[in-house]
Amino acid sequence: MILDERKARILAAVVEDFINTGEPVGSRTIARKYGLGVSPATIRNEMADLEEMGYLEQPHTSAGRIPSERGYRYYVDNLMEVQEPSEAEKDLIRRQIRSKAEELAAVIQRTGQVLAELTNCATLATVPRGGDVIRYLRLVPFGEGKAMVLGVLDSGEVVRHFLPVPLGVNAYDLEIISEVLNAKLKGMSVADIKATLLQELRRELDRHHKLLEQLLEWLRGASEQPGGRIFYGGLSYVLFQPEFHNIERLRTLLGLLEQEDYLCDLLEPSAPSADGVCIRIGSEVKRVSKFDFSLVLVRYHLHRDLEGALAVLGPTRMPYARVAGLLLWVANSLNEELKEILG
């Protein structure tokens, strides 16, 4: 149902005032603060209609109104204008991205913390493993009878592994093996390594076939691990939100954040808006028994199929326009800055 202009403006005013104050909103407040050009009596009648239609709720008989879940959804889908971050906020975020831009996990973790500070909500972020696409491999001696494998993935993540080295294999041999592996495997995923390529590797590294098989076995195992690490932060900010003074509500939130499979499921986008923001309100947040939470989610893309998620999790009384603007700007900045560095 599409609301007429006056009802829509009153609903927007109620949502925005409740987001700002956390207090039920009365008709006199709307008339005084939002300049709608109609009397408090008219606004009161319209608010009663909006309540009957399911867009507003009245927590107490003598209180003003607050948005219902349906009211928030209508506001987000039809009335909200995404707010662009201030220049100071952009500069703060930009510095975090550039400060450690070659360490993707550190960038995402710190950026999530800054988002928590700016929104006073919890933040969630996934760091892609880079699939299993290899940018660089090197074997270096590490004591007697042992070598360390250094691998750099598409995400910029550095992985390490130790392998036993057969007798007679020296530093020069390891350098030659590294050169062959980089020439053959750079830019490929483990899944892309076909039988013909394996034959080539075994032929060129025939003397070191045992070491090669151990290395390939490790690569296969690494590629089968879950594809993304999850960071979350900002719990200290959530504690100050009035909605989470309720111990049961807070316990529910903390319980959710301990379930990694739930978080992975939660960070999968569904039906994003045209600008790329996915907003889930109340009961749309999966597996929550008391629907007091909302989630605003964006994806960031680096290159190839490499992508991660950034999300803000907080009460349904969330400043959606501001949060969506911050997340979109961060995602776009990550796309541009990190693409150039990770190349």
Image (cartoon, rainbow, N blue to C red):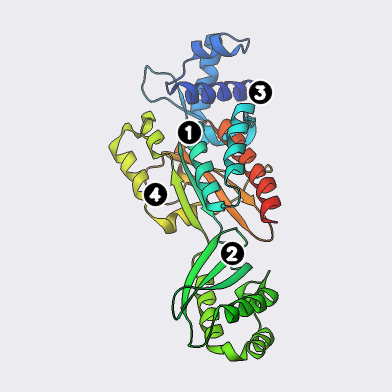
For label 3, the residue is 5
Q: Which is in the foreground here, disc 2 or disc 4?
A: 2
Vertical arrangement, residue 181 with respect to residue 341, above or below = below
Q: Amino acid at mark 1?
A: Glu
**Which residue is drawn at the image coordinates 56% and 35% (left, top)?**
323
> Residue 246 has which mark?
none
- Residue 295 visible (yes or no): no
Horizontal and vertical percent for residue 17? 51, 21
Q: Secondary structure at mark 3?
A: helix
Badges 2 and 3: C-beta atoms under 8 Å apart? no
Q: Amino acid at mark 2?
A: Val
Vertical arrangement, residue 302 with respect to residue 329, above or below = below
Tell me how far mark 4 sits from mark 1, CA to CA. 18 Å
Quick one: label 2 or label 4, which is nearer the N terminus?
2
For label 4, the residue is 257
For label 1, the residue is 117
> Residue 152 has which mark?
2
Horizontal and vertical percent for residue 112? 51, 42
Badges 4 and 1: C-beta atoms under 8 Å apart? no
Quick one: label 2 or label 1, which is nearer the N terminus?
1
Horizontal and vertical percent for residue 148? 50, 72
Q: Amino acid at mark 3?
A: Glu
Tell me how far mark 2 sits from mark 4, CA to CA. 30 Å
- In the picture, measured across the screen, residue 329 lies left or right of residue 235, that is right
Quick one: label 1 or label 3, which is nearer the N terminus?
3
Quick one: label 2 or label 3, which is nearer the N terminus?
3
Tell me how far mark 1 sits from mark 3, CA to CA. 36 Å
